[in-house]
Image (cartoon, grey):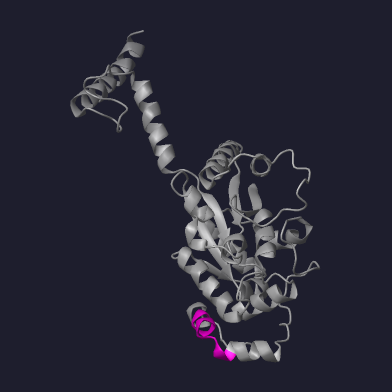
Amino acid sequence: MTQAGDDREPLQGAIANALDLIRRNGSVMDGSVTTTAPLGSLLDQCRALHRASTEDRADPIRLVHHFACSGGTIISKCLAAMPNAVLLSEIDPLSTIPMGYPNRFCPTDLIEQLHRTRHPCPDRLVIDMFLASLDVLYQNTIRSGGYLVLREHSHSRFCENLDWTDRPTVREMIADRFAVRSAITIRHPMASYTSLQANNWVRFTPSTLEEYARRYTAFLDRHAGCPTLRYEAFVADPEAAMKMLCGLLDLPYAPGSPTLAPTISMSGDSGRSGATIAPRPNREISEKLGEEMKASPTYRALCDRLDYDPDFR
């Protein structure tokens, strides 16, 4: 008994000293304890400090940004193959691109259902609904040990006939509420533009290479500071490229994950087919497009910015 009492005395003394220090310093964390409020137990103080430190280390939402026909789907599939990654494809709650016939069955899509009512559906309401749902998903993903990744549908904003300066990007929507890690994947602008033409997805006006380059430049400006991964580097060495991208996104990397990508189903899968990730031949450039390529100052400036040869072959 005497020995047990002797062991407790130093601990009790340390606790008393800690409580006295808290009293004299006023607060442990902003708003949690004050000199005028009743001092909670030392255990409560420790819990509060733990919550604060956990919030400081909040796991980020990972975001991937790219233009259409730039290899974003296959790269996103590789990300989705990483252990415990939860990847949502082609996200933009403010997208104006029709999702199918007007009365398509969508019992789980509250935002789409709201758009179909007779009542106004302002952007702010849509964003609030999106953020509320995202918060529930984020918290559940964190609790289950997962990593949330959003593939933004940048095409909805920058390659449709609308004012892209008039509404926020997905990154801007969520950055005030969540920690964010972003990366951009890029491809030679001429390669992505010719693929866009082949898919009949050039829906902006004027439908020229100069206009495309202007929109691509605006996309890059809006995501200034985000690190980039080149599609050409990815197809040359998928393992090395994905390891780098996972590092940029603070996402655990698993060797061999690119081999699993072809087994993953994902929206936006309009380009490559087959199980092999490798460079593909470039599309032929028409005489008209060749002339545009030579005459477009914004295209040539864009290639210079991205360190690509504007004389595409």
Image location (x, y in percent) of residue 8: 32, 16
Residue at the outermost left position: 24
Residue at the outermost right position: 274
Image location (x, y in percent) of residue 7: 33, 17
**Which residue is at a point 29% across and 17% down the rendered structure image?**
12
Q: Is residue 297 magenta?
A: yes
Image location (x, y in percent) of residue 300: 52, 85
Of residues 55 and 299, the one nearer the viewer is: 299
Q: Is residue 204 magenta?
A: no
User: Which stretch is magenta?
Assistant: 294-302
Instruction: Please say whether residue 194 is visible from this viewpoint.
Output: yes
Residue at the outermost front position: 118
Of residues 145 and 288, the one nearer the viewer is: 288
Q: Main secondary structure of the magenta part?
A: helix
Of residues 115 and 145, the one nearer the viewer is: 115
With 148 as the anchor, is 195 left or right in this view?
A: right
Image location (x, y in percent) of residue 221: 46, 68
Q: Quadrant of the C terminus?
A: bottom right
For residue 36, above or below residue 162: above
For residue 40, above or below residue 289: above
Q: Quadrant of residue 43?
A: top left
Residue at the outermost top position: 1
For residue 134, above or below residue 80: above
With 39 as the anchor, is 288 left or right in this view?
A: right
Q: Quadrant of residue 18?
A: top left
Of residues 108 and 266, the one nearer the viewer is: 108
